[in-house]
Image: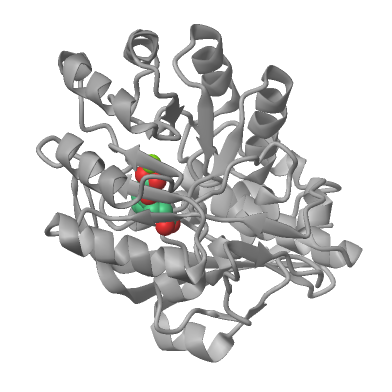
Amino acid sequence: MQIQEVTVRKLKMRMKEPFSTSFGTMQDKHFLLLEVYDETGNRGWGESVAFDTPWYTEETVETNLHMIRDFLIPLLVGKEISHPDQVSDLFAPIRKNKMAKAALEGAVWDLYAKRKGIPLAEALGGERKRIEVGISIGIQENLDDLIDKIQGYLDEGYKRIKVKIKPGADIDVIRGLRTAFPEVPLMADANSAYSLDDIGLLKQLDEFNLLMIEQPLAHDDIIDHAILQRALKTPICLDESILSLEDARKAVEMGSTKVINIKIGRVGGLSEAKRIHDYCMGKGIPVWCGGMLEAGIGRAHNIALTTLPNFILPGDTAGSSRYWEKDIIEPEVIVEDGYIHVPDAPGIGFEPDINTIDEFTTATWKFKA
Ligand code: OSB
Ligand code: MG
């Protein structure tokens, strides 16, 4: 197949509630939505997970637009592609910019699966018919609010709870949650808020039987995490630090991580996500699928990826209604008893809702061969 045309839309969607982490709060989600068209008019959809500010990684909506328009589309359009794994080879001359690459590559994967008439999950080699999911909850004003929120999500069926922590809102919060929910599978995500000076504090988390602690130290570190892991019983899970299979290999070999959070955007696409999955499976390192507060298209890609066998732990792919009054796909993503049913229609298996997409679109660009 050949990609002959790409449509890039910029969208703005307001989340139902603000989402707060150790480095700030967001409520308006700005992102790019991509359509790629082949020579026969088939199309595939991709969503960029870059935010409008560079707090999680260095990428933003605007840097993605620049990379996609000025570098990645010219490398992709008109090339003969027999398998989406080739897209990362075409993009290899461009350093990093993983989320920009992943958005285009994801659209090619959807297109490829649609041309074959198979679900994206099957094209990736996934077998699960349903995936088990958890939920990630932002920092709240006070412990009672957090407990109420968690109770609500447990009632909805979510089976694993992740809470954000930061210095000053950590040990007491986790102690309070463990008292309120002694048995719930619980974990904490620090989004890089600590340093090795905090080893003593982080060791106190060991008494709460957390599933794992996610990215306690610097966003680009794998060395200090190995030192910290030797001091902790609680398993460390790396998120921000893992941008590639090479990063995963180094982190696993150094003992910096016992679990990996795989995000398609952070690692540059589904092909690299699958490579990391396969490597971790060989090493006995469980993985789970992280989230970037995606709208429906990105969410659908996450669901497909999570059908691979080493996605053993529930991920952050919650249902559409956890984020949006109205999502941009039909049907929306629904969580029942903690599970999402994997669609069996070709490609991502959800239908983009063009009217809703138009409603949230603030700008559109078309690129042709
Ligand atoms: O660190 O996993 C993270 C959201 C935005 C940026 C980073 C993270 C998160 C989440 C929420 O934890 C995941 C989601 O619900 O999509
Ligand atoms: Mg994280």
Note whether residue 71 is visible.
Answer: no
Q: Nearer the viewer, residue 132 or 281?
A: 132
Snapshot colouring: one colour
* Residue at point 24%, 59% (across, down): 146
Dividing the picture into quarters, in which one does residue 92 lie?
top right
State the residue lying farthest toward the right.
Answer: 116
Q: Is residue 233 above or below residue 21?
A: above
Quarter of the image containing the C terminus?
bottom right
Say if residue 149 shows up in the picture: yes
Q: Between 307 and 264, which is closer to the camera in this rendering? A: 307
Residue farthest left in this picture: 168
Q: Residue at x 42, y 88 (%)?
A: 359
* Residue 250 image point, x, y percent: 53, 13
Residue 118: image quadrant is bottom right
Label tally: 0
Q: Quadrant of residue 240?
A: top left
* Relative horizontal placement of residue 73, taking residue 83 as reference (left or right): left
Give percent across and percent down for residue 141: 12, 59
Residue depicted at 32% across the width and 24% down the height: 206
Query: x and y percent of residue 161 in the render?
Result: 41, 51
User: Which image quadrant: the N terminus?
Assistant: bottom right
Q: Is residue 165 left or right of residue 350?
A: left
Image location of residue 20, percent across then percent down = 22, 55
Question: Residue at coordinates 45% horizontally, 35% vertically from top-left?
Answer: 211
Name the residue at the bottom extreme: 355
